[in-house]
Image (cartoon, rainbow, N blue to C red):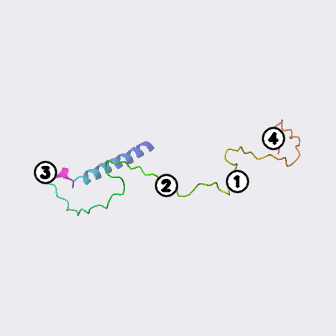
Amino acid sequence: MRNVVKSTILGMGLLTGVAFGAYAQTDSVAALPPGAQAPTPPAAAVVPSAGYVGPKPGELGAWQEKQTQTVRPSEAYVGPKPGELWSSPEKQTAPVGKSPDTIGGPRPN
């Protein structure tokens, strides 16, 4: 029963979509009788475009960036200096104790 209701709803949705699609095409040029002229759209004013900023057609657009100041390392950098290896020494904070014996599994409640 559930599949019947589902397929009925989907079928009705498909038929509705086809009907709306057919109705939407009734005002198109394809609906005109043979030999009829399509309505002309109103003329739009053409505005000249602004000057193009990029390279002219056929030219290569290769720009070079100029360095404005010298590059210097940051004073706030915490890491190692360039080319240096860095590792922080590990310090033992407490004496090492024996691990608890948990071979039998977790403790019962």
Q: What residue would you read off at disc 1?
A: 78
Residue 1: x %, y % from top left: 44, 43
Distance in Å between CA atoms under marks 4 and 3: 87 Å
Residue 32 part of the magenta-drawn span: yes
Residue drawn at x 87%, y 48% is 94
Residue 44's quadrant in the figure? bottom left
The three-letter code of the residue at mark 3 reads Pro
Mark 2 or mark 3, earlier in chain: 3
Camera-side mark, 2 or 1? 2
Binning the other alpha carbons within 10 Å of mark 1 as few (below 14), some (14 to 19) or many (20 upward) gives few
Q: What residue would you read off at disc 3?
A: 33
Distance in Å between CA atoms under marks 2 and 1: 30 Å
Q: Which residues are magenta?
A: 27-33
Q: What residue would you read off at disc 2?
A: 66
Whether label 2 touches label 3, CB < 8 Å: no
Q: What residue would you read off at disc 4?
A: 106
The three-letter code of the residue at mark 4 reads Pro
